Image (cartoon, grey):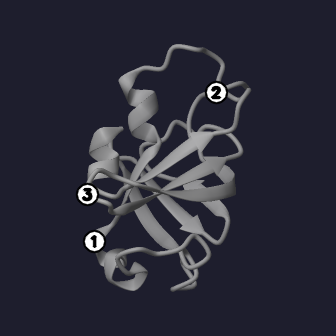
Amino acid sequence: FTLAADNCWMVCIPRIGTLSRMKLNRNDIENHIIIPNKSDVTTMGKESELKNVGNETSGGTSFTSLNKKHLLIQGEIIYTGQGYKDARQVKILFDEHFFNSKDQSYQVLCIEQPLEGGSE
């Protein structure tokens, strides 16, 4: 988590009650730390607000998870892609900004369900 905060990456947190097990493994965590693809960074700006993510282009903003899986944010929906076990459309419930030890902002998204796994 510190790595994500230090690099100002987005962190997706599934809402309470959507995880099927209490003990998470490294893969579970890495699925939910997402990094904007370099081609989209210029359209997002340094500190983009959630309302702007995915609205810069009609196709949304593409991300790669810390464990190299692909996803897209378009409006308030995250679409899982290559690398995830199944294709999901996960609603972003709300977002909050936090600050790391260097006083840089990073975004945490509360999402409707895990991007992979969870209660099924």
Compare residues 111 and 57 and report the one nearer the observer: 111
Question: CB of mark 2 within 8 Å of CB of mark 1?
Answer: no
Q: Earlier in the sequence, mark 2 or mark 3?
A: 3
Rendered position, 40 above or below 105 = below
Rendered position, 45 above or below 93 = below
Type of amino acid at the residue the image marks with label 1? Lys
Q: Secondary structure at mark 2?
A: loop
Type of amino acid at the residue the image marks with label 3? Lys
Q: Earlier in the sequence, mark 1 or mark 3?
A: 1
Residue 102 has which mark?
3
Q: Quadrant of residue 93?
A: bottom right
Residue at 64% in and 27% down: 118
Question: CB of mark 1 within 8 Å of CB of mark 3?
Answer: no
Give the spatial CA distance, label 1 vs label 3: 22 Å
The residue wearing badge 1 is 38
Residue 28 has which mark?
none
Residue 118 has which mark?
2
Please state the horizontal and vertical placement of residue 27, each as a whole percent of the image: 39, 29
